[in-house]
Image (spheres, helix red, strand yellow):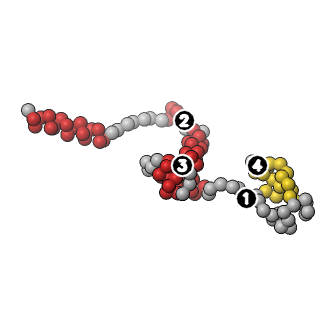
Amino acid sequence: MENCPKCKSKNFRKDGIVKSRQRYFCKDCKHRFTVEQIGKPYNLKKDALILYLEGLGFRSIGRVLHVSHVAVFNWIKSFGEKLDEFRNPSDIQVMELDEMHTYIGQKKLLLDLDCC
């Protein structure tokens, strides 16, 4: 925060919090204002979620997007917490399939038959 947006004065003070954002009061022009939201854009956070769902790790996502891996972890965690609000446990059916294990298991079985 550098200047009052109305009179460009540097003579201001904190004046409470409104909707989780710091509010300021200019002592010269008596104008109350808040600053732009600090943080990364929503689209960057959404891209991190997409990369996570594609299987990349937190550190890899951080390197690709040029952000901290801790920030990526916190973004993914907050997306997950928001998802819990919409999730209905009775509607979830889980099925797990591991194709690679099945393939290796069959290949091993074929090798055992060739040996005998």
Mark 1 crowd level (few <14, some 14–19, many ≥20, 10 Å Cα): few
Is 55 placed left or right of 37 in the picture?
Answer: left
Mark 3 crowd level (few <14, some 14–19, many ≥20, 10 Å Cα): some
The CA span between labels 2 and 4 is 30 Å
The CA span between labels 2 and 3 is 30 Å
- The mark nearer the N terminus, 2 or 3, is 3
Q: Secondary structure under badge 3?
A: helix
| Circle 1/circle 4 CB separation < 8 Å | no
Residue hosting label 3: 69
The CA span between labels 1 and 4 is 12 Å
- The mark nearer the N terminus, 3 or 1, is 1
Given residues 70 and 48, the one toward you in this image is 70
Is 55 placed left or right of 75 in the picture?
Answer: left
Residue hosting label 2: 88
Give the residue type that dot 4 points to: Lys
Tell me which residue sits at (83%, 52%) in the image.
Answer: 14
The CA span between labels 3 and 4 is 28 Å
Is 87 placed left or right of 54 in the picture?
Answer: right
Q: Secondary structure under badge 4?
A: loop
| Circle 2/circle 4 CB separation < 8 Å | no
The x, y position of residue 37, in whole percent, is: 70, 56
Mark 2 crowd level (few <14, some 14–19, many ≥20, 10 Å Cα): few
- Say the numbered circle drawn on residue 36: 1
Tell me which residue sits at (54%, 57%) in the image.
Answer: 66
Residue hosting label 4: 19
